[in-house]
Amino acid sequence: MTDVDVYFSFRSPYSYLATPGMLAIKKNYNINLNLRPILPVAIRTPETLFSPANAPRARYIQLDWPRRARFLGMSDKWPSPDPIVQDMTTLEVSEDQPYIYRLSYLGVEAQHRGRGPEFAFEVSHLLFGGTRNWHEGDHLEKAVERAGLNLGELEAAIKSGQQIKEIEQNQNFLDEAGHWGVPTFVINGEPFFGQDRIDTLCWHMAGLGLKKGDKREMELKVTNDLQASENSELRSRLDEYNEPFVGKRETIDLGYAIRNEEGDLVGGLIGSVVWTMLHINVIWVSDSLRGNDYGSKLLLQAEQEAKKLGAEFVRLHTFSFQARPFYEMHGYVVISETENFPRGHSQYLMVKAL
């Protein structure tokens, strides 16, 4: 079976963000997914990481990873305590590092028992999931248990400290693969760097015929007889595929109506909040109400409610003969245009940050 090695640091927020994808890969592809822990760059080369020249990169990471976590529906809390013992006023990294070595050694032993990716998932979610003092009590024990392992057994195995040799070897293998960062996935010597390259890795593995359940094209038949009852099945199958990457899809429907004194519908809005996005599907007011801010009231109410529900963005479509200037007045920007759709017109995709 083909090996896919994932080079991983228990202090890296991007390694943490990759863990749902790691489990999805292990589940959906005929591969051996091997966890290869390495030490963080803060331990290996602190003089490089904390140099003035590297300050813009460090600032960007602190901005980007929590944003990416929220986009994926994952926790954006930095571990407490930090797996690296460091004086944050001087940036001096302590010679005594009980946390990161312990976690990395445990990760090596988890991989020896065939549960490396599961261990990385559970422990990373413990660290970055907002649990304070994760190293105390039974927090780590329960996380390891969820990964299908026994912490006492792993702790006994790391007493010798021999795992450092394998960790150093992992670093050498990563260097040989032509990369330096984590998470990096390596298959047949080819590296795929970053939690946002998992989809590219999946595409690559599918091209190698490694996806479970793959059949030769000649054995399949495409027909035009999809049943109405199968529509929901297709959507649920896609949601199952997406879930390890972005979390469970929860759709919250929004609907607002404007009625006259007789109770007749004279305007309204239909939308839904999915993950961090408000999708506005329909907004309409009758001709008699236009120019009286009713459309603005509908839009504002939907945005305010969506923001309370955790939405960070809004998206909608409008045609060139509809309401582009109206939406632009409310802060929406065009990010794409489909020309000649419908014929003689254009359709715009517009978004706004809440």
Image: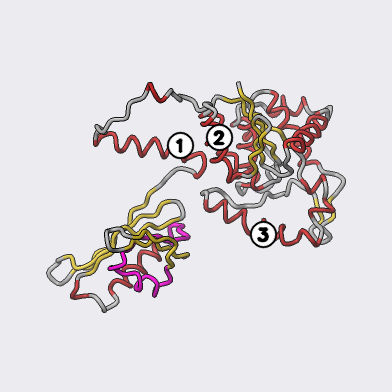
Crowdedness near tag 1: few (<14), some (14–19) or many (≥20) residues, C-alpha within 10 Å: few
Q: Quadrant of the N terminus?
A: top right
Between circles 1 and 2, the one closer to the viewer is 2
Residue receiving disc 1: 241
* Of the image marks 3 and 1, the number of the one nearer the N terminus: 3
Q: Tell me residue 331's x, y (percent).
A: 43, 71
Left or right: residue 88 versus residue 143 is right
Left or right: residue 168 versus residue 71 is right
Kindly identify which numbered label has been placed on residue 204.
2
Q: CA distance from mark 1 to mark 2?
A: 17 Å
Q: Tell me residue 137's x, y (percent).
A: 68, 39
Q: Which structural element holds mark 2?
A: helix
User: Could you tell me which residue is drawn at 78 percent across and 38 percent down?
Assistant: 101
Give the answer, above or below, for where 93 lies relative to 329: above
Left or right: residue 145 versus residue 249 is right
Q: Which structural element holds mark 3?
A: helix
- The stretch in magenta equals 306-332
* Of the image marks 1 and 2, the number of the one nearer the N terminus: 2
